[in-house]
Image (cartoon, rainbow, N blue to C red):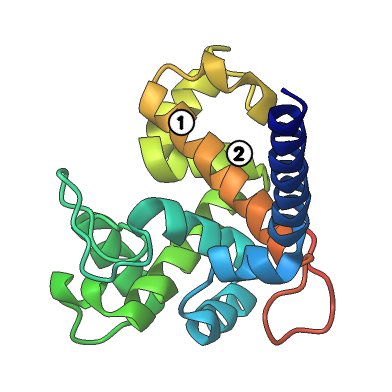
Amino acid sequence: MLKRLAQLIRVAIVFVALGILLSIAFGSSWVQRMLNPIRYVDVITLHSRRHGLDPFLVAAVMRVESGYQSDAVSPKGARGLMQLMPDTGRWAAGCLGIQGYSDDLLFEPNANIRIGAWYLRQLLNQFGGNVGVALAAYNGGPSDVEKWLSAGKWSGSIDDLQQIPFAETARYVDRVSRAYELYLRAYESRWPGDDAPRVL
């Protein structure tokens, strides 16, 4: 009986020690960065800076939209890393002066991130810099978001996502916000290669 009890105590100590080691390892920023890599850092940096965006936000959008798959296509026809609709791509290409634009260009990472960052900036400008509202518009469309806000259906706060009439859009804003916060923790608010912390 005592032998069995001693054996159980040893097993419990091993599990406790293992739990402590795992919590330390997974709490470390190095491990978090390994588990949450950011791809296309140079391209994100270029276009985020060009449009005055937090690159962690652009990375979070890409993570949720496509999982960094440049050839991703949604059931509705959105394309590429930032899942842009062809109509949005054509409009943005005209505004940005992109010569020889075709919808297939949305599968090219540099073009997709360039257009996606520009579009995200347009939405932030349209909605007074409110990131949650801009993200909702990115997913659900700016005209629907304007209707929700003007009708008082949604306060525009991330704390009130349950008010958003489209459940998919509410989930989207929540997922991007969580990915953004995860990146900030994992990278200690320092964009890879930058010295200064980034704050949205």
Q: Which residue corresponds to the image point at 49% horizontal and 66% vertical from the top-left?
A: 117
- Which of the labelled discs sits on residue 181, or is there none? none
Q: Which residue corresponds to the image point at 16% horizontal and 44% vertical from the top-left?
A: 76
Q: Is residue 40 left or right of residue 98?
A: right
Front-most of residues 152 and 80: 80
- Which of the labelled discs sits on residue 171, or is there none? 1
* Residue type pointed to by label 1: Arg
Residue 167: quadrant of the picture: top left
Q: Is residue 87 left or right of residue 117?
A: left
Q: Residue furthest right?
A: 196
Residue 92: quadrant of the picture: bottom left
* Residue type pointed to by label 2: Gly
Q: Is residue 149 left or right of residue 5?
A: left
Helix, strand or loop at label 2? It is helix
User: The C terminus lies in which quarter of the figure?
Assistant: bottom right
Q: Which residue corresponds to the image point at 68% horizontal and 50% vertical from the top-left?
A: 181
Helix, strand or loop at label 1? It is helix
Percent coordinates x, y for residue 20 in the rendering: 78, 49
Count how many numbered circles sit on residues in the image.
Answer: 2
- Which of the labelled discs sits on residue 132, or is there none? 2
Residue 127 in view here: no
